[in-house]
């Protein structure tokens, strides 16, 4: 039960016999001492295999670190692709506009700075298309007016070439002009 455990010390006394001392250590001292001895034994075993344990821990940490680095690299490439794809689309569309294809429009799905860039590009392309349409219309009108002036000029020249008598033209104030 709860009996006290004792520690005994024996010392030989020359010519006299033995000197014995006993000390009560209280209950469960032997169990505590056995646990301490067991812990010391386990510590000695762990001390012997510490290199293997360190190697296993370092190997695990190395694998984990490698996975984290590879994951970060993959994530970086993924983000870079998401950023560069719209920029490359704008660059390609700008080259098409430079070659005269003003019908180019880009899909506007982003609400960030790239989305603003795409909306500005689409607006610019629409404005250029409208300006070209206005310019083409004005050019056609000018060509038509030029043709009418040429016809009128040819008509006047034909009249002047076929008149035998002289023609004098006068301005509003009555002065003769050539």
Image (cartoon, grey):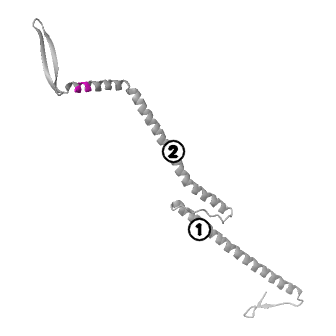
Residue toward you, 162 or 33: 33
Question: Is 44 in the magenta?
Answer: no
Residue underneath mark 1: 123
Residue toward you, 78 or 28: 28
Residue 87 % position (x, y)? 57, 57
Location of the C terminus (image quadrant):
bottom right
Residue at 68% across / 64% down in the picture?
101
Location of the N terminus (image quadrant):
top left
Residue at 56% across / 65% down in the picture?
119
Mark 1, Cα crowd under 10 Å, few <14 / some 14-19 / many 20+, is few
Residue toward you, 128 or 55: 55
Q: Real-space Cα distance between discs 2 and 1?
A: 36 Å
Q: Residue furthest front?
A: 1
In the image, is residue 25 above or below residue 164?
A: above
Question: Is 33 in the magenta?
Answer: yes
Residue 97 % position (x, y)? 65, 63
Residue underneath mark 2: 73
């Amino acid at each position: 039960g709860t009996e006290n455990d004792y520690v005994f010390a024996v010392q030989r006394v020359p010519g006299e016999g033995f000197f014995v001392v006993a000390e009560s250590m209280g209950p469960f001292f032997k169990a505590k001492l056995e646990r301490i001895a067991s812990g010391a034994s386990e510590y000695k075993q762990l001390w012997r295999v510490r290199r293997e344990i360190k190697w296993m821990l370092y190997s695990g940490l190395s694998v984990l670190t490698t996975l984290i680095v590879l994951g970060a690299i993959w994530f970086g490439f993924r983000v870079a692709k998401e950023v560069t794809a719209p920029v490359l689309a704008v660059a390609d569309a700008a080259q098409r506009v430079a070659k005269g294809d003003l019908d180019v429009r880009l899909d506007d799905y982003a609400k960030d700075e790239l989305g603003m860039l795409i909306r500005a590009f689409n607006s610019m392309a629409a404005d250029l298309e409208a300006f070209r349409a206005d310019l083409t219309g004005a050019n056609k009108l000018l060509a038509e007016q030029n043709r009418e002036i040429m016809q009128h000029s040819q008509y006047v020249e034909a009249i002047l070439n076929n008149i035998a008598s002289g023609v004098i033209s006068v301005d509003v104030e009555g002065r003769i002009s050539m």
